[in-house]
Image (cartoon, helix red, strand yellow):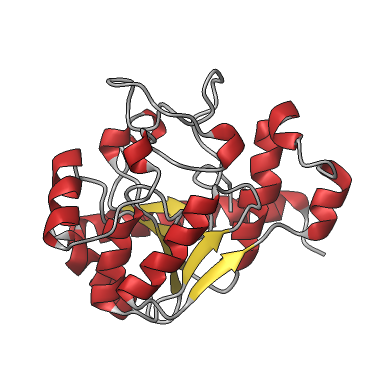
């Protein structure tokens, strides 16, 4: 039997080693361009053990275009919360076809979780943190089982907890890869134009950052890249980047 103290020491040692590995990876690859960072992670560092996580939001096409350039068969996880805008689901299908992605996995929350906590579908109103945990955090944890690393599209200019992210960071027992960490809005806009990437259909309607429909609002000018998320609440993240996996 593993004693609690021994288990805690093991977890602390694992976390320490992962942080050191992330630091060394950042030193080794941090000066690479985003495509080469992604290619190194997929082909050299974590071959067969890395997935991409995408919300198929307003900026997602940039990262997914890099994925398609490196390997169209890289697993891409989409958290199908059951609360997305219809436009987001249509955009997901459009981007998959446009970029030729071959392994996009739409992951839904567990039916039993929703049955006990959100039978009427209004948990987002009563307890948004628990709603995100059941519809995003736990499904992603299950989806990433067997993977050593995952790629996401966070950027420092988005502010908040994202302002200091590194290209590689430790996340529990996995390494998180942020190849777009240093990008700015102009670089994103230029890439959309040069690569002829289709925009999210709700962007033209004034949505700067798009998540689940009940918790997404049109952001005001100058209010920040994620100002339309969980408007009126202190909440700024769904939790998948804070979970202690």
Q: 8 or 117, which lies in front?
A: 117
Give the x, y percent position of residue 243: 58, 46
Q: Residue at x 26, y 57 (%)?
A: 62
Q: Can the viewer see residue 208? A: no
Place of residue 228 in the rendered image (x, y in percent of width and height, measured from the top left): 44, 29
Say if 122 sits above or below 152 in the image.
above
Q: Quadrant of the N terminus?
A: bottom right
226 shown above or below 223 = below
187 relative to 1, above or below: above
Give the camera-side residue of 131 and 198: 198
**Is 146 left or right of 25, judged from the image as shown?**
right
Of residue 204 and residue 115, the one placed in the foreground of this image is 204
Q: Quadrant of the C terminus?
A: bottom right
Q: Please tell me in which quadrant of the rendered image residue 141 appears.
A: bottom right
Tell me which residue sits at (26%, 35%) in the image.
157
**Residue at 36% of width from left, 51% of height from top?**
200
| Foreground of the two, 3 or 140 | 140
Residue at the spot 75% in from the left edge and 36% down from the top edge: 123
Residue 232 placement: quadrant: top right
* Residue 10 point in image, percent of width and height: 61, 57
Res 12 visible: yes
Q: How many marks?
A: 0
The picture places residue 3, in percent across and down from the top left corner, at 78, 55
């Amino acid at each position: 039997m593993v004693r609690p103290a021994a288990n805690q020491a093991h977890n602390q040692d694992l976390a320490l080693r992962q942080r050191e590995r992330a630091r060394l990876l950042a030193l080794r690859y941090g000066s690479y361009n985003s495509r080469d960072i992604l290619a190194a992670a997929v082909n050299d560092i974590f071959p067969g053990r890395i997935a991409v996580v995408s919300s198929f939001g307003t900026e997602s096409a940039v990262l997914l275009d890099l994925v398609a350039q490196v390997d169209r068969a890289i697993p891409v996880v989409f958290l199908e919360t059951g609360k997305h805008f219809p436009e987001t689901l249509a955009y997901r299908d459009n981007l998959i076809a446009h970029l030729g992605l071959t392994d996009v996995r739409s992951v839904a929350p567990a039916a039993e979780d929703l049955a006990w906590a959100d039978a009427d579908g209004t948990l987002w109103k009563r307890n948004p943190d628990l709603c995100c945990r059941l519809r995003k955090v736990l499904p992603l944890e299950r989806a990433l089982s067997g993977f050593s690393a995952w790629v996401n599209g966070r950027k420092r200019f988005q502010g908040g907890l994202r302002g200091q992210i590194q290209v590689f960071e430790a996340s529990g027992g996995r390494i998180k890869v942020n190849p777009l960490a240093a990008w700015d809005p102009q670089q994103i806009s230029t890439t959309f134009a040069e690569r002829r990437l289709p925009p999210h259909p709700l962007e033209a309607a004034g949505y700067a950052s798009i998540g689940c429909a009940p918790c997404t609002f049109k952001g005001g000018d100058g209010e920040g890249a994620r100002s339309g998320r969980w408007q009126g609440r202190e909440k700024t993240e769904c939790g998948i980047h804070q979970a202690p996996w």
